[in-house]
Image: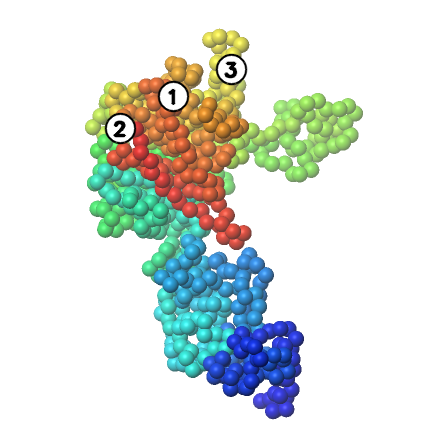
Amino acid sequence: MMSPLVRRALIAAFIACVSISGCKCGSKVVGQGCQSDDECKAEFNNSSRAFCDQSQNPPTCELHPQKCDTANDCCPAQVCNATGHYCFDKYTPCTQDSECPSDGQVCKEIGVFSKGLGCTWNKCDANGGCADPSTTCFNHYCVGTPPCNGGCTSPTSPVCVTTTNLCTPAPKDSTCAQTCPTGKVLVLTNPDNIFDTCVESTEKCECDSLPPLIVHDVSRYSSIAGRNGDQNLYVSAYDGEYGDLVLHTFDKNSLDKPTKTEWLDGVPTTCKIGGDVTGPRGGCVTPGPNVGQYTSIAESPTGDLYIAYYDVDNGDLKFIARYGGPAASWTTPVTIDGSTPVGSSPSNGDVGLYASIALDKTGVPAIAYFRRGDFNASSGAEDGPSTGLVYAYAKRTQPLTAADWQVVGDVEALNRPPPVCGGPCPTNQLCVQDGALQQCEYKSPSCTAACGTGQACVLDQNTANASPACRTTLNDDALPELPRGVGLMPQLGFIDGTGCNTSDKGCPVIAYYASIGIDPADGKTKSIPQLKAVLATAGGAAPVWGTPVVLDGAIDPDPQHAGQTVPSTRDTGRWPSLAIGPVGAAGGRIAIAFQDRTSQQLLIYQDDVLFAHASHAPPGGSGLIHVVDGGLPDQSGTWHPQSFPGAQTSIAFTASGKIALAYQDATPVDLIFSVYDPSALKTISRVTLQPSGGAAGFWPHMAIVSGTAYVESATIKALSAKRVINPLHVAQTQVP
């Protein structure tokens, strides 16, 4: 213990220090200043440490520092100076919000002894609400993440001080000695009864339920379903923060936020609880298997929900369903195709990307999806060259297990071309064509003559002395942002009537994108972007597929020679969207919207059948492919450079036979809604549904219910330097 002499010296020195630094304790005595210690004690909860500092002019009320041997002698949110044996406030210092370590924290003046800028949270309002939607009210403060990392585990500092987001020793009251159950955290009942002016006799603790996890990224790879007679809309999506499959339920009368969000796959059974156990992920903060990309959802007329999605970890196609309405339970997730784990045998490879699910005319689900690579025995991984469009069909309307599915197999397949030179060359080498060989050779500055266009000077490995020589350089013509293959971005639908031999079930139609094709000039597989489609003449578990048809791309009319063609240089066919119209639909029952990136246009193909290399129509003229959005302003609009509409698109027929389209314009990064009239052969309206509050319009999908188009999409934006919030939006608009 300190001697009285040391204590008096310490107190005198500390008072002088506080006076010099200007650190006051909020004295309310004004005018002539305080007159006595008793007058000051009334200001500071009758603290015996209060005194009237007569050395100031005017005199001010101050506090003698709290003496201590350990932090247990101090107020909550204080520590004991081991050398001077006095208590002082503990908080995380800062100069601006971005320096604070936890989501939602702000930098503002806090503390008493001594005051300063520190990290804290904003207070909840009188109704327990928070102005920042990314925070939630907990223990009177709006927190963006569970305080104290979900609870204090140190036996010497077991209580969480919400105000400072730090742990503190337990006050003496017995309520502060309790152990909280899982999902709750021990906090001060009054989180503001802290720092140097606390009233220790009133300190109490309680176990509060952890705040729900704040979800930041549950809008990617989304898909929507809705129907007449159901007040709800259902949006499946991927949790990009944890790698989970989620389902959002929206009320059609209140689209601002979902009424319910469920985590269907990806949450581990054993994990650390860091949030409310009744909230998102059951409060689990431990990442589980990475699943839930490329979701596709369908709803039956009776309200059954079907979701197909991609298992990222294992490269598999997965499926989950709910039969019987909102009160029913979800089925156990099942793997339909692929392998678990990667490289196991048998294996159909890396499958399930770009999944598209649809119900046939009898309500049986089917899925079209992309295979990125087959199982490679030499590498033991699913990185083989075989790519393909694959089709799976259920054996019943309500499949429960993998045995209830039939993987019908490849609709089309094509091996990826090998990369030039077998793969990337070292940084000091170039890939060149050296005679009949493709090989990496060392760069050289010593060629006797300048090399021609497309050549470089290298050390020729085929000469005795590796002499410098000019050789043609080779570059991989792959599209770096997309896999190489056939069957990308498939869209599945069912059509009945003429040409379909199973009209009771319907015949499957699939539109898809191919980033590679066979060059007829030399028979080699190359990057040849094209829109393709395939139509079966029979459905069920044994569909009879027709020959895949190139609708656009690969070849174009020769502008120099009428009636002849030339290899196409356009990158066309990405993000196809398929809709099947009623019998007699103007323009045709099969409508496919897609993007021509080279021409910067959103196009639509429409007919009752599939025509190879369909003709492009002039404005208002005849042809099978029409421009929906040319990326240019109309005559009444503000001028802007040509944009890139149709980066991702969703289409549907309206009751009047028009075609509604929701898509992203990638230049302003907005969500656009247009209506195309097949009878007039033109677009009759175009509006921005959701102005950019960030990058908008990602993964747009649409459901038309009772004359209203409901369009879901994701906005990707940075809310602050520390937090990224990628919200899911559902917009609505009437359709003609």
Looking at the image, which residue sits at the far bottom?
Answer: 4
* Towards the viewer: 487 or 435: 487
Q: Badge 3 local density, few (<14 within 10 Å), some, or many (20+)?
A: few
Quarter of image, res 304: top left
Instruction: Work out whether residue 116 or residue 46 is closer to the camera in this orientation and state it.
Output: 46
Q: Is mark 2 on a helix, strand or loop?
A: loop
Q: Earlier in the sequence, mark 1 or mark 3?
A: 3
Q: In this view, does 202 lie to the left or right of 538?
A: right
Q: In this view, does 733 lie above or below 312?
A: above
Residue at image location 48% in from the left, 38% down from the top: 383
* Front: mark 2 or 3: 2
Task: Tell me if label 2 and label 1 are in contact, CB under 8 Å.
Answer: no
Residue that sits furthest to the front in the current view: 31
Query: Can residue 653 be seen from the camera position used here?
Result: yes
Where is residue 496 shown, x and y percent of the image? Answer: 25, 25
Where residue 453 sits in the image (x, y, percent)? 68, 23
Q: What element carries label 3?
A: strand
Could you say which disc has been placed on residue 655 in the image?
2
Point out the tag, 2 or 3, that comes first from the N-terminus.
3
